[in-house]
Image: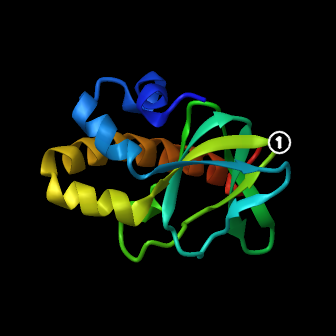
């Protein structure tokens, strides 16, 4: 089995990061799997991790009053799942449900926050990369809301 030191540089999210940064991040990583239809986390729960999908598909869900759970976006291998671990109050803003057997690299949020606080270059690099993920999720949410509440001709 390959270690995280070999896996992380292959992931798009981490490409271009220094070997030192990747080694630091790898110290907070573990392998996790979710069965099809299993909730990875639900909206409002404590956000203590983020995930990098290695295999499978995950639906990002939001609760819409009067409509129930609405899928905002479907993500798959290579995508990052979760940024709420990075900002107080560390609670999930969306839910995430595995659509099929899903294998991920899970990163301990408290471990990474502590390392980023000690190494501001690492913290800045992570913040830049997660900002892009946040922008993509907000744009996907906007499109989904237009679809749900928009006027259809």
Q: Secondary structure at mark 1?
A: loop
Answer above or below: position of 105 versus 39. Answer: above
Image quarter of the N terminus:
top right
Along the viewing direction, whichever of 90 and 72 lies nearer the viewer = 90
Along the viewing direction, whichever of 147 and 59 lies nearer the viewer = 59
| 10 Å crowding of disc 1: few (<14), some (14-19), many (20+) | some
Position of 110 compared to 35: left or right? left
Position of 140 compared to 42: left or right? left
Residue 39 on image: x %, y %? 75, 61
Residue that lies at the very extreme toward the front in this rendered image = 1
Q: Which residue lies under the disc numbered 1?
A: 100
Residue 38 on image: x %, y %? 80, 58
Residue 72 on image: x %, y %? 66, 50
Q: In percent of the image, x 28 and y 48: which residue is there?
A: 127
Q: In percent of the image, x 27 and y 63: which residue is there?
A: 114
Which quadrant of the view contains residue 105?
A: top right
Tag count: 1
């Amino acid at each position: 089995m390959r270690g995280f030191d070999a896996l992380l540089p292959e992931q798009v999210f981490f490409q271009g990061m220094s070997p030192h940064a990747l080694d630091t991040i790898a110290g907070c990583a573990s392998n996790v799997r979710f069965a099809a239809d299993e909730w990875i986390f639900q909206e409002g729960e404590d956000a203590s991790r983020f995930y990098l999908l290695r295999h499978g598909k995950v639906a990002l869900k939001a609760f819409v009053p009067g409509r129930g759970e609405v899928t905002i976006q479907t993500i798959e291998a290579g995508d990052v799942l979760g940024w709420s671990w990075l900002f107080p109050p560390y609670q999930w803003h969306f839910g995430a449900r595995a659509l099929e057997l899903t294998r991920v690299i899970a990163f301990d949020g408290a471990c990474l926050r502590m390392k980023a606080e000690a190494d501001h270059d690492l913290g800045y690099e992570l913040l830049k990369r997660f900002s892009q993920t946040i922008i993509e999720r907000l744009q996907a949410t906007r499109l989904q809301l237009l679809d749900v509440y928009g006027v259809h001709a």
